[in-house]
Image (cartoon, rainbow, N blue to C red):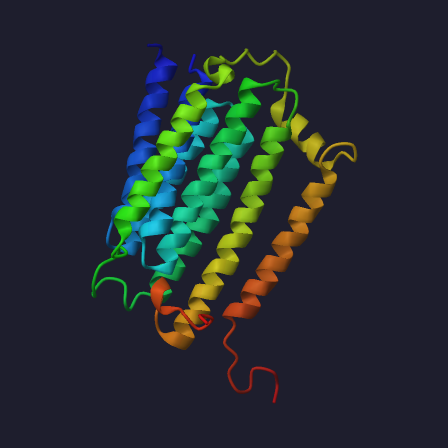
Amino acid sequence: MVPLSWYLIFAAALFSIGLFGVLSRRNAVAILLGIELMLNSVNINLAAFWRYGDVSIMTGQVFAIIVFAVAAAEVAVGLALVISVYRRRNTVVADEIDMMKW
Amino acid sequence: MTGEQIVFLLVALFTLGSGLMVVTTRNLVHAALWLVSTLFGVAVTYALLSASFLAVVQVVVYIGAIAILFIFAVMLTRKDMRDQGAQQNPNWWVGALLSVLTFIGLFFLLQGWSGMSTTATAIPTGFDAISELGTALVSPDAFVLPFEVASVLLVAALVGAVYVAFNPRKGDFGK
């Protein structure tokens, strides 16, 4: 049987990889890819805590489903913003999107 | 090592390797395809955790919808993707340092926690996780309110996405 720690360390590693993607990429779409990795690692944690706790309490899985819904909403809005900015400014590089910079 | 542990380690290595390719590969179409394989590895992880509904939703919603949306967005904004310059920030090493520190911090935080070596108890026979989950999602004394709020959020976000990305031309509204 796999101990709980393996799942948690696996999720922590996936989270750190996603964090690296968010912090290091220049392209706005690639930053959103990193955010997806981070949301997935959180979902692994939720499912693992459901399985290793009392399985008759479904809170972990319900939270994971709500994270799915929020991730879908986030991707839709984020990619719509990226496409809209690309149409107006002809760039998707995060450094160059500075219309709101003071 | 039991068979389950070997399967878990293989899946975890596959998923983490694909995740590394997502954040490091130059070509963004390839990054989106590596994201598909990462998401598939996570779906197998759900299956290992016997969360069958989550595994199916991961394949249908994440791989079927979100990853395809990413591939569309990459292709629609493709012009300055392949050719010019670096794909990473000039100070990408700060990000690398921060994420390694985050991982080390989480690792030692988890080491100090007493519940780390918990092993799962067998799922009782006759326990149907999917029907329990469905009941929990719509029962008034469980999660019906967060469920409905998530639906409203999804509708609002999609309507907003259409509005933000919409590019009106002359004659689109009749006149």
Q: Is residue B51 above or below residue B119?
A: below
Quarter of the image for residue B97 reads top left
Nearer to the camera, B44 or B84: B84
- In what quadrant of the picture does the C terminus of chain B appear? bottom right
Residue at figure coordinates x 79%, y 35% from the top left = B140
Give the residue displayed 52% in from the left and 87% down from the top. B170
Q: Report the side of B149 relative to B54 (left or right).
A: right
Image quadrant occupied by the N terminus of chain B? top left
Foreground residue among B83 and B48: B83
Q: As displayed, is residue A69 above or below residue B42?
A: below
Q: How many marks?
A: 0
Q: Left or right of B60: which side holds B88?
A: left
Of A85 and B127, nearer the camera is: A85
Q: Residue furthest bottom?
A: B175
Horizontal and vertical percent for residue A73?
55, 53
Q: Residue furthest right?
A: B140
Residue B26, horizontal then vertical, whole percent: 23, 53
Residue A31 visible at all: yes
Q: Provide residue A35's location: percent of width, then percent of height.
A: 43, 47
Determine which quarter of the picture holds residue B106. Answer: top left
Evaluate whether residue B37 shows in this view.
no
